[in-house]
Image (cartoon, grey):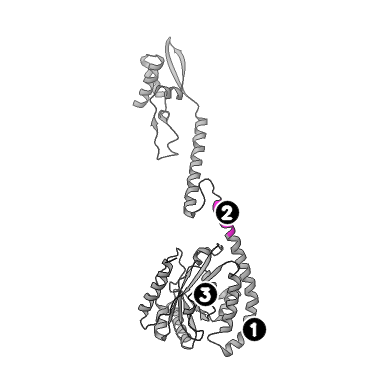
Amino acid sequence: MEVVSHSSTTIRHRFGYKDSRFSTASSLFPQSYTYKGLNPHCFPHKRAILRNSTNSAQSRYSCVPRKDSSVSWNYFKPKEELNRTYSNNKVCNQNRLSRYIVVRSELAETGYPDASYSLSEHKLSSKVRGICFYVVTALTAIFLFLLMLVVHPFVLLFDRYQRKAQHFIAKIWATLTVTPFIKIKYEGLENLPPPDIPGVYVSNHQSFLDIYTLLTLGRSFKFISKTSIFLYPIIGWAMFLLGVIPLKRMDSRSQLDCLKRCMDLTKKGASVFFFPEGTRSKDGKLGTFKKGAFSVAAKTKVPVVPITLKGTGKIMPAGMEGILNLGSVEVVIHKPIEGSDPEELCNKARKTIADELNHQ
């Protein structure tokens, strides 16, 4: 009430009215009319500023002189608030939309506040490349899978464990699929053991493209894959012909069977491949290594071959297998590591890969 009285007194002196009943006019003013600015419910962080000047009070109210029982007094009527309310709501909505676009752009690391559609435009070309990538790999897989079926009886008779012929076909499939879209650079190919020497290969895991990239090396190592992937048409069937080792995650018995099969294969001259992190990295950082692969190497006395993959996570990020960004991939093959202590082998292999990733 003090605010209203102050405003009323200011106006009274301005227009020269001295009637004692002038103070009763303060009851006609809603409290919200004594504040300046937008609706406080729209912007809770900006409170209203009091209007105490003569000009502001005059601009907010219309003065209508009236007579009542031969006594002159002022009747104050608020101006119509319809236009002001509509304008304030419009500003509020625009501000909310702008803040939403800014937050959305910051999270996506693309776009700018006035262009909410920039994110979809940024991904459009990557989505098109992703579609073309899967079309090429599917068409190529159909024809090469038929070739795998033809040679499979001979593979079982003469090369049951390494299956070099099947892996050669898989190399052709991966090369034809990747070459039109991605450039692969190899470093340290001289560090690869001879094809007839078994080993345990380990690598960081960033993307679905890692399998394609590693198949282009032309080595007949056996991957470890989830059992559900074997149900995929063509791809899953080809994995079965390649001798990929199935694994049921969160099943301790399946894990033990997997390790036993890996040891049997290495003893019979075949190589195995592990992703010691267990899953793909979503932020590009190297995760903790599990010791299963290094236990196999220590017990079978075969070397561990660390491999570092660079760039696959940026081209096809984990969880975004439908897109294919521009970029190149680098494959670094490090010198083999030998030893009888699984923990020591694990630490050396992880440090080797981590140091290489830090150099990119």
Residue 41: x %, y % from top left: 43, 38
- How far apart marks 1 and 3 lie (CA) works out to 24 Å
Say which quadrant the C terminus sits in. bottom left
> At numbered mark 2, what does the secondary structure look like: helix, strand or loop?
helix
The structure residue drawn at horizontal position 61% and vertical position 72%, both measured from the top left corner, is 176
Q: Which residue is mark 1?
A: 150
Q: Which mark is residue 214?
A: 3
Residue range in magenta is 115-125
251 magenta-colored: no
Q: Which mark is residue 19?
A: none
- How far apart marks 1 and 2 lie (CA) works out to 45 Å
* Mark 2 burial class by Cα count in 10 Å: few <14, some 14-19, many 20+: few
Residue 284: x %, y % from top left: 45, 65
> At numbered mark 1, what does the secondary structure look like: helix, strand or loop?
helix
Q: Is residue 354 above or below residue 29?
A: below
What type is the residue that disc 3 sits on? Leu
Q: Is residue 189 above or below residue 15?
A: below
> At numbered mark 3, what does the secondary structure look like: helix, strand or loop?
helix
- How far apart marks 3 and 2 lie (CA) works out to 32 Å
Q: Which residue is mark 2?
A: 121
Hey, which residue is sitting farthest bottom in the picture? 157
**Numbered disc in front, either 3 or 2:** 3
What type is the residue that disc 2 sits on? Glu
